[in-house]
Image (cartoon, rainbow, N blue to C red):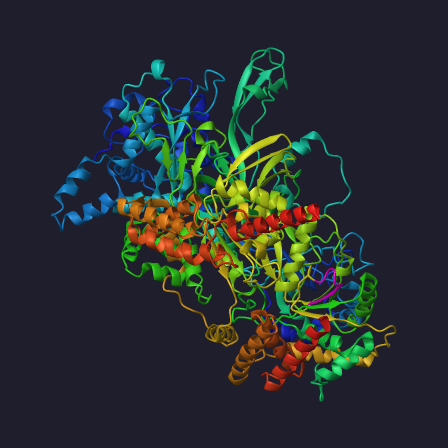
Amino acid sequence: MSLTEADWRSLGDEKSTLPCFDQDTPHSGVVRCLGMVQDMLAPEYDHTNNSTLMERTPLVIAPIPQTTPWFQEIMYDSAHRDKRLCWDDNNCAEPADPKVVANFFYDQYEHQPPKLRLNEVVELVGVMEQDVVMEDHHPRETSWKDTLISAFDAEEEEEMLPLPRLQVLWYRTLDLDQSILPPLQMPNPPSNELVASALSRALSIDTLTASAIWMALLSLAERKPCGTPRRTPYATTLGCASLAILLPDASACHQFQKRLEDVLSSILPSLVTPLLKDLPTPSKKSGRLAQSPLQLPKGATVLLNAGEIQPGPLSPQGLEMLQAVQELTSGHQVPYQFDGGMRIPFEADVRIIVLCTTETKSLLPCLLQIKGQPGLEPSDGSESMCQTIREHLAHARSGPPIDLPLQLLTDAQQDFLQRRQEARLRNATVDEMAFHRWLTLTRLIARGRRAQQAATCDWASALQLDDAMLSSLS
Amino acid sequence: MDYDNVELPPTPPRSPTNDNNDNRRPNDSPILPPSPMSESSSRQMPPPSPSSTVDELNEEPAFPLPEENANNNNNNNNETAIDQDIALIRGTNVHVPTAAAAFVDFLRHFRSLRAQRNDKNDDSESDSDDEEEEEEEETPLYMAQLQSLLTHGHWRDETTPTTTTHPSTATASLDIDAMHIYFHSEACQKFYHQMVSFPMEIIPLMDLLVHRELERLAPDWDIDVNGPFPRVQVRPFNLRQVSNLRSLDPVALDSLITIQGMIVRCSPLIPDLKVAHFTCCLCGHAVAVTLDRGRITEPTGPCPTCSTRDAFQMQHNRCTFADKQLVRLQETPDQVPAGQTPASVVTYAFDDLVDAMQPGDKVEVTGVLRAQPVRVHPRMRKLKTIYKTYIDVVHFRKLTTMQRDEQQRTTVPPKWTHERVQTLYALSRRPDIYEQLTASLAPSIWELDDVKKGILCMMFGGNSVRVKNTPPSNSNNNDDSWLDEENPPDEDFTTATAKLNKRGDINILLCGDPGTSKSQLLGYVHKLSPRGVYTSGKGSSAVGLTASVVRDPETRELVLESGALVLSDLGICCIDEFDKMSDTTRSILHEAMEQQTVSMAKAGILATLPARTSVLASANPIDSRYNPAKSVVENIQLPPTLLSRFDLIYLILDQPNEQQDRQLAQHLVGLYYETPNVVQPPMDHALLRDYIDYARQNIHPQLSDEASDQLLESYLEMRARGAAARTISATPRQLESLVRISEALAKIRYRETVTRADVIEAVRLWEVATQTAATDPRTGRIDMDVLAVGRSAADRHDDEILLVHLQELNQTMTDS
C-alpha cells in the first residue's frame, strides 16, 4: 500500500499540516520528514499479512548535514520548525551537530530495487511502526554470559538498532538547489563580474579570488544518462572545480575561514567545515555506516582549512583521513571503508574550497589554485545581496548541462596545441589537466550567465581567468 | 533397473529419535553427521514456506528401493514399505523411488560431460571408434570417487566416543557437480530441479543413496577390523544459475542457490549442541536428550532410579556438539551498483566447511536460503513480523576471478570450457595476435606501443623455477625433480629446501615526464590483473607494502595483516609515484623483487610471506621534467640496487611532436562530445583477461636449441658493444631478463617452445626500454653501470683523472 503522486498532489496544502517526525513526541499516525540517506541496511522480509512474505529495504535517514538557518526556514515552515527532523540523545537543542544520526528507517515494498542512492536527499511520508520496543540507553551490567553470547553472535548488534521505524507511503528525492528555487525567474540576473564584485566586497578580498570562489560555487558534475558522474581518465570528475586559496599563514587561513563561513552561510543551503584533525572517514563496520562529516549530499559545500595541518608523523587513521580528503578535493569522490578491507569510492558532487598556506598547498590538490589577498575589514554583506546571489546560484545550478559547441571545441584544440608549444619554449608544462581545467572553467562561466551553451567568449574568459590565477601563484 | 524390493535405511538427520535405537546393529543405521540440512528442525521457519512442513521422509524413514533386496534384508528394521505410487514427500512433487532411481543411475553411470556429449552423438556418428573404446574403459566418475574413499580412507573423525549409543563415526564429503546431474539424462534433469527446489528433502536422500552405494561397494565390511561403517555427506555445487546477492527474494526461500562474493568475516568455532547429556546429581542416572526443533528439553521429572525431582544436571563434557561457524559474505566492489552500499548475507558453515575459507577469499557458495524471525529483544521470546535471511552452506568453492558471464554459466560450468579453450587457441594462432593484444591493452592511451608490449610480457610472465638447495643424492643426474617449475605449491618459504629461486615475474619501471599517461597504464593493468594491487609510493609505508602485525578489533588477538606486495602474490603490484617512496619502504622491495618473499619480525611473530609478484612502477623526475643531460639515476634519484632489479625501464618523455599533440588534443576534446569518443579494442576486457589467465596457468614454454643459441649470441653481442670503451653493456641479470621476456613472448602465442623469433623480439624490447635508460648521456654509450652502481664508466674515468690531477697539484705545491 503506497501513495501515488496523484494522491499526494490531491492533498494540496493539507500536506503541510502533516506532523513532522519528532522522536520526543512520537506520532502514531502519518508523519513526514526530510533527510539524507545515510545508510542502507540488509533487506528484510516482512510477514504482516499471513499469506506472503514481502521484501523491504531499510534505509537509515539522517538530517542533512550542517544546513544553514535560512535553508531551514525555507524547508520547514515556521509552524513546524521546532519539530523538524529531530536528533538523538537529547541533542535537539543543537541541531547543527553533524555527528548525530536521526533514528528512523525508510522501507520500500513491492520487490522494487532501491531507487535511492546513498547520500541522496529525500522527503518521506509514512506511518510510524507500532511494534518497536524502544531500547533504554542506560548501560546495564554485563555478565560473562553476555560476553560469551556476543562473541558467538556478533550479528545480533545489527538487529538491535534502537531506531523507530517508518513505513513509507510516499517519497521523493530532492536536489538542494532545486528545493530552494524561487517561484519566479529573476528578470535581470547578475553577471559573473557583478557577483564576483559583490563577493569581493563582502569578503574583503581581491576580485580575482572572488571570481575563483564564484567558479567553485558553480561547480557541478556532468552526468551520464544513467545519473553517475562522468569521470575523466585522470581520476577527476568532469564539471567539478575545487578551489585552493593560498594565504600567507595559518592565522590568515583561520581568519578568512571565519569570514567565508559568515558570508557563505547566507548564500548556501549546507556548509560543512570539518576539522581535519580526527576527521573520521566513512566506514561501515558491524553492519552500520558510521556517520562522517565527509558523507555529504550533492550540492553541499565543504570548507577545509589545511592551514591547521602541522608537520609530524601521521597515525594510520590520519593517513587514511588525508588520503580520503585528497581524493575528495582532487577527484570529487570519497572512499568508504566496508567490512573485509573493501574500499569503494562514492561520488561527492560537492563544492570544495580549501584554505592553505604555501607549505600545505600540495597536501590537498585542487583543480584551481589562487593566491588570495584578503583585506582587513570586510564590509557587511547586505541581506538583499545574499538573497540575490542565492537565487541566482540556485537558478544557474538547476539549469540543464552546458553544451560545448563543435566550433568552440575546435578552437580549444587549436589553442591547446599553440599553448603547449609555447610552454615548451619556456620550459613549462601544459598538460591534459590544463586543458580539462580550461574547458571546465568555460562551462562554469557559461553556467554563471545562465546560458545553455558555452560561447567563444566563455572560452576566452576561462583562459584569461586561468592565466591570472597561475600568475598570482608565481 | 529394478529397485522395488530394497529398503533404504532411515534418515537420521531428520529424525533424531532414531539415534537412540538401541536394537540396531551399528552398521545398520549409521548416524549421519549433523549436516546443514539437519538444521531444518532446529530453526523456526516462516509459515508460508511450503517446504518447511514436516516431510514424509522424517516420519516414514523407510521406503522401497529395488535391486539388492536379497543382500540387505537385514537392514529392514521391520518397518512397512510404502507403496511407491503414494511415496511423495509432503508439500513437494518428489516421488521418492523415481528420484532415487535417477540419482543412483547417475552415480553408477556418469563418467564425464564429454562422454555424455559423445554418447548423444553416437547414434548419428560412429567413426570415432578409438575414443569410444577409451570411454568404455573410463570408470564412472563418482563411483570411482567412492571406491577411492573406501580404499584410501579419506575420512575424518567426526565425533569422539561418548557413550555406547553414540559410536565413533567417520565422515567424508562427496562433491557433486550439479551440472553433471543436469546433463546426465532427462530424469536427472528433473532430479536436478527437485534438488534445487527441495534441497532439504533431496540432499538427505542423496546422502542415503550414496551410503547405500558405499555399502554395495563394500559388502564385507567388518566393523571389528575396519571400525564403524563410514558415512558420506553429499555436497552439490555449481548450479546452472548464479544468483545475485541483491536479487534474492522470498521466492528463493528454502531452495538451493549459488551466490558469489567475498568472505569478510568468520566467527570463531561455535559448538552447536546436538545431544545433551544429563545425570542425576544424587544417583548418577544418565539421560541423553536430543535436540528437538531447536530446543533441548531439560528432564525435570522424577529420576527413574531415585525418584528425586529436578535433580538432573547437564554434563557438558559428555554432550555431543557439531562444529558451526558464522561466515559473512559480501558483494565484491565490481558487483556493487553505483550509489549503493555492498550487500552482504550471513552464512552458516558446518562440519568440515568450518575454517575451510578465510576472510578475503572470493568464493562461490552453494547453500539453502533460509529465513529466521527477528526477536523484539534478544532476551525476549516475542517475535517481530520481520525475517532475516541467512544461508546454510552446502559447498564452498574458491574463485580466482569472479565469473560474471551468467549466460555462459548456464551452458558450460567451468571457466576453461572446451569451447573457450578452443576460442583462445584459435586466437593464439592468428599471426597478428601480438599486435591485437597490444591494441587491446589500455586502448584509450595513445601510442606507447612498445611500452604496452613490455607490459603485455609482464602480464604473461616467464617460467618461475624454484630450485631446492640439495639435489636428491639417490637419483640420477637426469632427474629434474628438484627443479620445481611453475605453480610451486604453497610450500613453507622458510624451509631449507626452497631457498633458490629463479623468478619468472617481470618487473617494469615507467619513468618520465608528468602527464604521459603512466598512472593510467598502471590503473588499467591493476584492473585487468585478477590479483592486482594498486598503491601509491607517496602514501605507502614499509608495513603497508609488506605485512604488519595488528590487533584484530573483534578478537583482540595479534594477527598478521598482509600489505600490497603480499596481497598481490601471483599477481601484479602497481606502485605509482615510486620515487616518492621512503628509503625504508624501498629497502623492503629489494627482497621482494628478487627473492619474491617478504620477511618480518614483530610482536613475537616471525614470518616469511610469499610475494611472487610482478612490480609495475612509475616514477617522475625530481625536477618535474626529465633532463636528458642526466642519467636515469640522477633524474629519478632511485638507488641503483633497486633499479637493476627492473627487467625493463621505459623512459616516457614528452617530446615535441605536433602530430602526437594533435592526436592528444582530439582525444581530449572527444571526451566532451555528447557521446564521448571511445576507442573499441579488438579484444574485450573479459576475453583479454581469459587469454592471459589461461596462458599463465597452462602454458610453460621451454627454450629451444635455436632460441638458446640466439640468446647466447645476442648476449655476447651486447657484451661486446661495451668492450671497446671498457664499459659493461650487459650483465647476467640482463640475460635472465631476456629469458623471461622470451618465455613471455612464447606464452603470448600459446607455444610450448621459445623460438628464435621470440628471442629477437625480446632483445628488441629490451633495447627499446632499458638500453635508453642505461645510456650514458655524456658518451651516448650503453653502460649498465649507470643502472647497476649509479655511475658510468666515463664518470669514474673523470674521477680518476681528477684524482691524478689533484695529486699532481698537491705534489707541485709540496715541492714548491
Bounds of the magenta span? A352-361
Where residue A121 appears, x then y in whole percent? 66, 65
Can residue B239 be seen here? no
Instruction: Examine the rendered structure and indicate whether residue B392 appears above or below residue B482.
Output: below
Where residue B634 appears, x then y in whole percent? 58, 55
- For the view shown, which residue lies furthest in the bottom direction? A187
Where residue A89 appears, x then y in whole percent? 78, 52
Where residue A368 appears, x then y in whole percent? 67, 70
Instruction: Examine the rendered structure and indicate whether residue B216 appears above or below residue A107.
Output: above
Determine whether, in the image, residue B90 is placed left or right of residue B126. right
Nearest the eye: A8 or A392: A392
- Magenta residue check for A359: yes
Nearest the eye: A136 or A464: A464
Residue at x 55%, y 68% (from the top left corner):
A230
- Magenta residue check for B563: no
Instruction: Examine the rendered structure and indicate whether residue A425 appears above or below residue B401.
Output: below
Q: Quadrant of the N terminus of chain B?
A: top left
Instruction: Examine the rendered structure and indicate whether residue B776 appears above or below residue B443.
Output: above
Nearest the eye: A306 or A398: A306
Residue at x 46%, y 15% (from the top left corner):
B164
Q: Quadrant of residue B139?
A: top left
